[in-house]
């Protein structure tokens, strides 16, 4: 499944695979949204796969949000690898 980012009531729902093939487009889109809003919430319940590039991109978006005093929240049941990465970085 191709990556889709859907918005509903201000929340973003990511569906499909987050891989090196599409991570740049996702990152640019979410950074653009963060420029326009004070907070962004994404739900990753329907992410079927995330590679290291995807985890790194979400980490960078999160850290950028912190540095610009924005709120970036990831919700949903997602990849355990991603959760472990955030926990290991002491930012989860």
Image (spheres, helix red, strand yellow):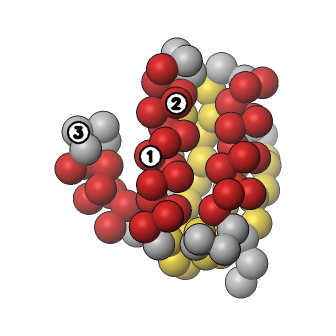
The mark closer to the camera, 3 or 2, is 2
Q: CA distance from mark 2 to mark 1?
A: 9 Å
Quarter of the image containing the N terminus? bottom right
Residue 85 visible in the current orientation: yes
Label 1 crowd (10 A; few <14 / some 14-19 / many >=20): some
Q: Is residue 54 left or right of residue 11?
A: left
For image coordinates 29% across by 56% down, the residue present is: 85
Residue on which the image places disc 3: 90
Q: Is residue 55 left or right of residue 16?
A: left
Q: Is residue 83 above or below residue 21?
A: above
Counting residues from the start of the chain, the first of labels 3 and 2 encountered is: 2
Picture coordinates of residue 24 (x, y %)?
68, 57
- The count of marks equals 3
Alpha carbon distance from label 3 to label 2: 15 Å
The image quadrant that residue 14 belongs to is: bottom right
Which numbered circle lies on residue 64? Answer: 2
Give the numbered dot on residue 59.
1
Of labels 2 and 1, earlier in sequence is: 1
């Amino acid at each position: 499944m191709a990556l889709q980012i859907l918005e509903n009531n201000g929340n973003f729902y990511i569906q499909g695979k987050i891989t090196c093939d599409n991570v740049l487009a996702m990152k640019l889109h979410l950074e653009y949204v963060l420029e326009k809003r004070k907070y962004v919430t994404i739900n990753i319940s329907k992410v079927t796969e995330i590679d290291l590039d995807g985890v790194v991109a979400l980490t960078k978006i999160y850290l950028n949000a912190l540095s610009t005093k924005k709120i970036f929240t990831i919700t949903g049941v997602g990849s355990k690898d991603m959760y472990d990465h955030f926990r290991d970085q002491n930012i989860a």
